[in-house]
Amino acid sequence: MPSLHPVVLFSGSLAGDGVARNTVHLANALARRGAPVEVVCLKGGALAADLRGPPVTCLGRGVGPRGLALAAAVPALHARLKALGPSVVVSMGNHAHLAVWAALRGLPDTPRIYRISNDPAHHGRDRLRGGLRELGLRLIAADATRVLCVSAAIAAREPFRRARRDRRVDILPNGVDAVAVRARAAGPVRHPWLEDGKPFLVAVGRLHRQKNYEALIDALALARTEVPGLRLLVLGAAPPDRRAALEGQARARGLSGAIRFEGEVANPFPLVRRAAAYVLPSLWEGASNSLLEALACGVPVVASRIAGNAPEVLAGGRYGALADPTDPADLARAITAQVRVETRVAAGDRVQAFGLDAVTDRLCRIVANARSEHDEIQMQPEGAGHLRPLSGGLRGTNTEY
């Protein structure tokens, strides 16, 4: 029998990123099973319209840098959780975890699941931030009823060692509704590059250092010596300063007319489907939704060897090309091979291994079992289970959604 207490899903926003999409997918799947659900976020977004019943509470503290906005929202989030008495709290994305951890202080009876949606090992050029991230992950892992990692590589990271030993870690990749993606990909689209018959690459993602478009631009310049006329279409949010820097690099490489930064596109799939290849050159990822969507579109793919679970998704190169994202020459070789019909590695039916229904079904089972698992953790003697055993009385019953 469903619990009367809601499952609370926390996401920074409901804009069009992967964390927001996964939040909506899980909320709808739980609601279909009769579970009460509430989505809590700093601010809404376009994906709120895709929720099928679950209410949304916006804390109204989404102004300013994301980290500061999340910190400012902790008191309001704590108050909301205390008022709701949720059966489970699920923190859906990495950036929100410390805010959720802080908001759960004083609520030891509440089961909490942290979904590790991006690779926590990337430290960039800032060693201090990397060290703070490591400390935060250890706090989260110690606190968690369950830790959900989107890839085996992430689950193997050092901060989760104790949680692995205690069997509190699950590996659960993202999923994709291939039928829905293909239906949208078949829709009408108008673009000047579809009219001249020349091949183009497509990359999907915001203009951020993580996405490594600098190396992709250099790789394009090299690939064009083998595939004359090859072009690059980038679909993703484009901060003016980043866009100007990348356009300057393109001009310096003689690629001014060969690269277009289109910004965010409501339906990118018709363009992805018609591309000569999809490229994911990221320096880090968790589990790329756009990679799964490209597989659903049937386009040949090229992915970075260190882009989260891309090597797992492509089975080590069986369903697409893998390349070193720090080596433009290696990236260019992979692109050239995938653009040419005679050398490309087809995706085949690989997308079927990542069906959205199967992923959300398993996630719903994990959420449903969190209550009983949390109660077992609380009953363990000091020093067992968590690094900091949770305290407080038992409440609630096992729930099956």
Image: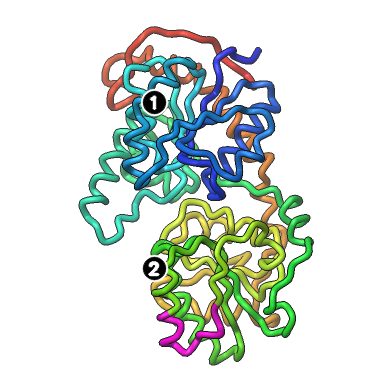
Disc marking residue 241: 2
Give whichever of 262, 130 is nearer the camera: 262
Q: Which type of secondary structure does the marked residue at label 2 adopt?
A: helix
State the residue at coordinates (52%, 44%).
19
Disc marking residue 76: 1
Q: Is residue 335 left or right of residue 42?
A: right
Q: x, y (%) of residue 373? A: 47, 20
- 10 Å crowding of disc 1: few (<14), some (14-19), many (20+): some
Q: Which type of secondary structure does the marked residue at label 1 adopt?
A: helix
Mark 1 / mark 2, whichever is N-terminal: 1
Q: Is residue 150 visible?
A: yes
Q: Is residue 91 left or right of residue 344?
A: left
User: Which corner quadrant of the image does residue 248 belong to?
Assistant: bottom left
Q: Magenta span covers which residues?
A: 248-259
The image quadrant where one finds the N terminus is: top right
Cα distance, mark 1 to mark 2? 34 Å
